[in-house]
Amino acid sequence: MPVARCMTVAAALLLAAVAARAADPQAGKAIAQAKCAQCHDAEDWEGEDAALLEGIMRDIVAGKVRHRTPMKLTPTEIANIAAYWGAASAPKRR
Ligand code: HEC
């Protein structure tokens, strides 16, 4: 493999690792327990993909999907909750 190509692959892998670490399931758990647990259990989302949950939550916050209560979350909080709820059912990768 040419060196330049090899560097590109290495950079892509590094970026993926950084992105995966950006979402913090522990922080998500804290927010979900504080704001969502009165109506949702993590098990409610069994089998749901974190990216899909993240998309739905973004749409709820943006007012595109109706939700029982108005939802105010930052993109980081959304990503963290999605990481937590998604991880409750996702196969363990690490
Ligand atoms: C007062 C109760 C209540 C609270 C608090 C609450 N939810 Fe919900 N949520 C509901 C109900 C009711 C539904 C619709 C029924 C269902 O899909 O289970 C729902 C649905 C959802 C859905 C699925 C929407 C869809 O169309 O598929 C998501 C995602 C969601 N809630 C996220 C959250 C998050 C994140 C929080 C915390 C920030 C939260 N909810 C807090 C009651 C609540």
Image: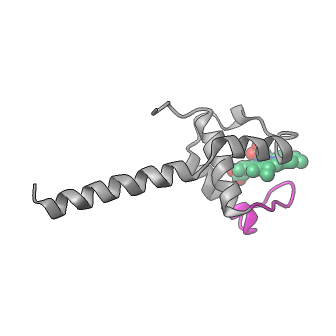
Asked if residue 64 lies in the magenta stretch, the reply is: yes
Residue 80 coordinates in the image, percent (x, y): 65, 50
- Does residue 52 appear left or right of residue 45 in this picture? left
Question: Vertical placement of 37 versus 16: above or below?
Answer: above
Q: Nearer the viewer, residue 74 or 47?
A: 74
Position above or below: 50 against 8: above
Q: Name which residue lies at 68% across and 40% down.
A: 26
Count numbered badges in the picture.
Answer: 0
Q: Decide whether the magenta segment is chiefly helix, strand or loop.
A: loop
In reply to whether residue 72 is colored magenta, the answer given is yes
Snapshot quadrant of residue 61 = bottom right
Residue 13: horizontal and vertical position, in percent? 34, 52
Quadrant in the rendering for residue 37:
top right
Q: Is residue 45 left or right of residue 1?
A: right
The residue at the far left in this view is 1
Q: Quadrant of the N terminus?
A: bottom left
The residue located at (70%, 46%) in the rendering is 28
Q: Position of residue 87 (x, y in %)?
A: 59, 37
In the picture shown, does residue 17 fall above or below 93?
A: below
For the point 37% across and 54% down, which residue is it?
14
Between 7 and 63, the one lying in front of the other is 7
Tell me which segment is drawn in magenta.
59-73
Q: From the viewer's perspective, is 32 left or right of 92? A: right
**What is the basis of the colouring in this image?**
one colour
Q: Residue at x 56, y 53 (%)?
A: 22
Q: Nearer the viewer, residue 36 or 21?
A: 21
What is the x, y in percent for residue 18? 47, 53
